Image (cartoon, rainbow, N blue to C red):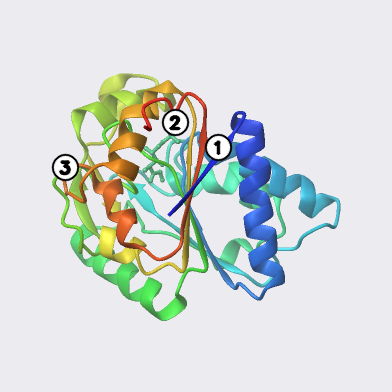
């Protein structure tokens, strides 16, 4: 695992954009996308580079990490919509090649299995962008998740619902359930690139990088992967020894 210190979100975004651009030049054909605040500077920078003709994502497939259960894909809070507004509309990806779990599927268990198969058929993911929850989650694999888990239905931790309430009108509107790629699924990507900025992530980053590999900190499973880049600013790195 390499830990790369950066000055802040803008530098983190530029570095992640460099990694994606280099992977595309080297023949990458599948991107893995996280939602949330951490990857936004990278998405904005990739948008700028696409518009400037410096990189092209045309012809690539993209797979989302997760989705809320119970929100239609067009709901403003759905992750499908978030990725469309914050990334796909900024770059030259074909929207038809952007895949995610359908949170409005009538049978979420079957939908999770379908998505896992879609990832196996369409993968492997060449570069998977990740954020980290303050409780150490990646995707929505909350503490206690099996390190070998596959895409499945999960209940959000109360801390995660509180952290994500900023995207909803009322805290009680945050869904309780999600479909998320499992830790075993995420580990099948060739290169995992995790972005952590801000002091709220410091304890989780320290546990992920220096703690034991344990389901109590799901991101610690990254220690078992052969190619991980952790992009961390000073605040997020504050508890690293
Ligand atoms: C989002 C996801 C989550 C977030 C994490 C950090 O698709 O899978 O693991 O990456 O909750 O969120 P932010 O970046 O908003 O702090």
Question: How far separated are the C-alphas under marks 2 and 3?
Answer: 20 Å
Left/right of residue 52 with respect to residue 21 in the rendered view: right
Which one is closest to the eye, mark 1 or mark 3? 1
Q: Secondary structure at mark 2?
A: loop
Q: Is mark 2 within 8 Å of ligand 1?
A: no
Are the residues tagged 2 and 1 within 8 Å (C-beta)?
Answer: yes
Q: Earlier in the sequence, mark 2 or mark 3?
A: 3
Q: Secondary structure at mark 3?
A: loop
Image quarter hosting the N terminus: bottom left
Residue at 16% in and 56% down:
146
Within the image, what quadrant is residue 42 found in?
top right
Front-most of residues 204 and 65: 204
Above or below: residue 166 compared with residue 44: above
Residue at 46% in and 77% down:
122
Question: How far separated are the C-alphas under marks 1 and 3?
Answer: 25 Å
Q: Earlier in the sequence, mark 2 or mark 1?
A: 1
Q: Residue furthest right?
A: 52
Q: Residues within 10 Å of mark 1 (few under 14, many from 20)?
A: some
- What residue does disc 2 label? 237
Q: Is residue 240 visible?
A: yes
- What residue does disc 3 label? 216
- What residue does disc 1 label? 5
Q: Residues within 10 Å of mark 2 (few under 14, many from 20)?
A: many
Q: Position of residue 181 (x, y in %)?
A: 31, 58
Q: Position of residue 223 (x, y in %)?
A: 32, 55
């Amino acid at each position: 695992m390499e830990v790369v210190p950066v000055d802040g979100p803008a530098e983190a975004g530029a570095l992640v954009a460099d990694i994606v651009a280099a992977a595309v030049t080297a023949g990458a054909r599948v991107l893995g996308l996280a939602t949330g605040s951490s990857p936004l500077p990278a998405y904005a920078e990739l948008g700028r580079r696409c518009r400037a003709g410096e990189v092209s994502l045309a012809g690539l497939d993209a797979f989302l990490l997760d989705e809320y259960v119970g929100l239609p894909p067009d709901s403003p809070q759905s992750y499908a919509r978030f990725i469309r507004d914050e990334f796909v509309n900024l770059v030259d990806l074909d929207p038809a090649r952007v895949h995610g779990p359908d949170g409005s599927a009538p049978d979420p268990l079957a939908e999770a299995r379908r998505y896992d198969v879609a990832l196996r058929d369409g993968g492997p993911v060449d570069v998977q962008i990740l954020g980290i929850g303050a409780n150490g989650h990646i995707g929505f694999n909350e503490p206690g998740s099996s390190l070998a888990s596959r895409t499945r239905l999960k209940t959000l931790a109360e801390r995660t619902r509180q952290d994500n309430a900023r995207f909803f009108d009322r805290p009680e509107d945050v869904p309780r359930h999600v479909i998320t790629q499992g830790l075993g699924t995420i580990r099948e990507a060739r290169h995992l690139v995790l972005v952590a900025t801000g002091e709220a992530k410091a304890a989780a980053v320290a546990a992920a990088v220096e703690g034991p590999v344990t389901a109590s900190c799901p991101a610690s499973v990254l220690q078992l992967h052969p190619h991980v880049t952790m992009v961390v600013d000073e605040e997020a790195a504050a508890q690293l020894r």
